[in-house]
Image (cartoon, rainbow, N blue to C red):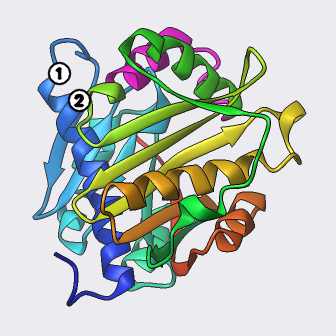
Amino acid sequence: MYQSLSLETVARNINSDYDLARLSLYQQNSDHFSDIQLRPFGIQSVAARFPEVSFFNKLHLPHHDLLPRWNEMLEFYGPRTKFYSRTPSGSGISKVMEQMGGRRITSYYTLMGELTHSPEEELELAPIRFVRVGHTEATTFAKLYLELFSACPNRLQAAISNLSMLHRLPGLQAYLLIEGRRAVGMELLYISGESALLAGGAIRPEARHRGYHRASIRHRLAIAKSLGCKYASAWTYGQNAAYFNLVQGGLTQSYVEDVFQFQGK
């Protein structure tokens, strides 16, 4: 499927596929999530608005042709709504985002690797279990996710409903990391064709520095390999501990994006 493409292109494909798959899922369930609004601007840009959970207020795939409709887009988000967008670092569209009032808040690093080895052979013994999350555990998973990422503390129920919907997304697998009888971490894995995306993972602060995040990376790479994936991709905000754990797990930096924050009007 991706044989003639560069690893960067493969990484961009799987990341875009995950974003658009989630948008499509929410759109299909618009009756359940009546507050979620999706609106195209130009040939590829899609604005997602969900007032209850600011994390989902994103301008996806920004393109120069949305500029004539920029004020219309700001009005779509409204005066009290912050929204976010990612653009290739240092690119022309990134410079345009700054000119349009965007505040660059961090860098988004995408890492990529070919699954030419057998990660399942490299798994180290760790005093944790990986328990796959089903619909019945979706609320527990969502609460832990929001706690670990310090997300939406004042909009907990809306965020739980939104995250719980992700378990209906084809290709997505979610796991809890269990130490003894307690969940100490979570992880997400998204499969699309021959590619896998390590779509998110975190460990409770008191359980860090025990190798659990590295074990989580190896666990997901092993699943991807067993399902026939040839490529794996992951992302981090900044070159943090997760970034270096991913590098140690065999992935390399593919590209960097600027993350911009905007204010609607």
Quarter of the image containing the C terminus?
top left
Q: Is residue 139 above or below residue 13?
A: above
Judge the density around disc 1: few (<14), some (14-19), many (≥20) Cα neighbours within 10 Å. Answer: few
Q: Which residues are magenta?
A: 149-165
- Kind of residue at disc 1: Asn
Expressed as whole percent of the image width and height from the top left, the position of residue 257 reads 50, 71
- Kind of residue at disc 2: Tyr
> Contact, CB < 8 Å: mark 1 with mark 2?
yes
Q: Is residue 22 above or below residue 198?
A: above
- Res 29 label: 1
Does 178 appear in magenta?
Answer: no
Name which quarter of the figure residue 244 lies in. bottom right
Q: Residue at position x 81%, y 50% from top?
A: 211
**Mark 2 lies on residue:** 26
- Give me the C-alpha separation between circle 1 and circle 2: 5 Å
Asked whether the viewer can see residue 226, the reply is: yes
Report the residue that reaches farthest toward the front.
Answer: 121
Q: Is residue 252 above or below residue 208?
A: below
